Amino acid sequence: MSLSRVALAVALVLAPPEYPERPEERVFVGFITDTECGPDHAPMLATGNMGGNDAECTRKCVKMGATWGFVEEGPRTFYQLDDQDLPERFVGRRVCIEGRLEGDTVLIDALQAAD
């Protein structure tokens, strides 16, 4: 075995393992929505078949196959949610989500009402 191969083997053994960086945890404040309407329920509500407010529209959209989503206050940024059980009881309420952002998805660690 050549000296350069030995040096490479030693370097690989001694190098610390590279782990992907874990996204930083943060708090998101906003509203539960659905992936069909995202941040704007007005077009669906205008049809007259989706209820009388955003919360009713969200529930109907999810019942028809959409998944739960989230709209952050301020920038009104829309995100997917990884947890599809927790959000249901918070529809129509302002919420705080503790979690991490991975792509366009919030990975929920904790979800609670903010109002």
Image: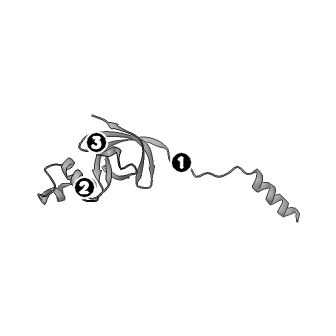
Name the quadrant of the N terminus: bottom right
User: Measured from the top left, where is residue 18 in percent x and y?
Assistant: 65, 52
Q: Nearer the viewer, mark 3 or mark 1?
A: 3
The image quarter in which residue 74 lies: top left
Residue at the left extreme, as displayed: 48
Residue at the top extreme, as displayed: 115
Q: Is residue 2 above or below residue 75?
A: below
Mark 3 and mark 1 in contact? Answer it, CB < 8 Å: no
How far separated are the C-alphas under marks 3 and 2? 14 Å
Secondary structure type for disc 3: helix
Which residue sits at x=28%, y=55%? 38
Secondary structure type for disc 2: helix
Q: What is the three-letter code of the residue carrying label 1?
A: Arg
How far separated are the C-alphas under marks 3 and 1? 29 Å
The residue that label 2 is drawn on is 63
Colouring chosen for the image of the structure:
one colour
Q: Is residue 100 left or right of residue 48?
A: right
The residue that label 3 is drawn on is 89
Secondary structure type for disc 1: loop
* Comes first in the chain, label 1 or label 2: 1
Q: Is residue 38 left or right of residue 83?
A: left
| Pointer 2 local density, CA inside 10 Å: few below 14, some 14–19, many at least 20 | few
Q: What is the three-letter code of the residue carrying label 2?
A: Lys
Kindly identify which numbered label has been placed on residue 22.
1
